């Protein structure tokens, strides 16, 4: 379970870096689509971050008892 939590945290980091890349990319012609894609990546990063933290904390809790 801790392995799955670490994978979720890695996916969250990748999604956040993609969000920053899309947010800072000013060469795109269609900025509205780029903004929507950036918001979607940010939401995905938040979801996976929360899921990863919950899984890692739960796995640590189970190993102590």
Image (cartoon, rainbow, N blue to C red):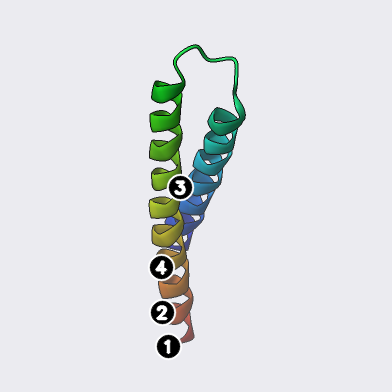
What residue does disc 1 label? 65
**Is the residue 49 above or below the residue 41 in the image?**
below
Q: Earlier in the sequence, mark 4 or mark 1?
A: 4
What residue does disc 3 label? 45
What residue does disc 2 label? 62
Q: Are marks 3 and 2 in contact (CB under 8 Å)?
A: no
Q: Earlier in the sequence, mark 2 or mark 4?
A: 4
Q: Are marks 1 and 2 in contact (CB under 8 Å)?
A: yes
Q: Secondary structure at mark 1?
A: loop
Q: Earlier in the sequence, mark 3 or mark 1?
A: 3
Q: Nearer the viewer, residue 3 or 16?
A: 16
Q: Secondary structure at mark 2?
A: helix
- CA gap between label 3 and label 2 equals 26 Å
**Nearest to viewer (mark 3 / mark 2):** 3
Q: Earlier in the sequence, mark 3 or mark 2?
A: 3
Q: Earlier in the sequence, mark 4 or mark 3?
A: 3
- CA gap between label 4 and label 3 equals 14 Å
- Image quarter in which the N terminus is found: bottom left
- CA gap between label 3 and label 1 equals 31 Å
Q: Which label belongs to residue 6? A: none
Image x and y of residue 6, in percent: 51, 55
Residue at 61 percent of width and 30 percent of height: 24
- CA gap between label 4 and label 1 equals 17 Å
Image x and y of residue 25, in percent: 59, 24
Q: Nearer the viewer, residue 38 or 51?
A: 38
Q: Secondary structure at mark 3?
A: helix
- CA gap between label 1 and label 2 equals 6 Å
Residue at 47 percent of width and 67 percent of height: 56
**Nearest to viewer (mark 4 / mark 1):** 4
What residue does disc 4 label? 54
- Rate crowding at label 1 as few (under 14), some (14 to 19) or many (20 or more) other CA atoms within 10 Å: few
Would residue 21 appear left or right of 46 to someone viewing this image? right
């Amino acid at each position: 379970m801790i392995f799955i939590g670490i994978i979720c945290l890695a996916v969250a980091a990748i999604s956040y870096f993609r969000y920053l890349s899309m947010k800072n990319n000013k060469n795109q012609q269609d900025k509205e689509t780029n903004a929507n894609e950036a918001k979607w990546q940010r939401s995905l990063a938040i979801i996976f971050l929360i899921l990863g933290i919950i899984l890692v904390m739960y796995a640590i809790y189970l190993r102590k008892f």
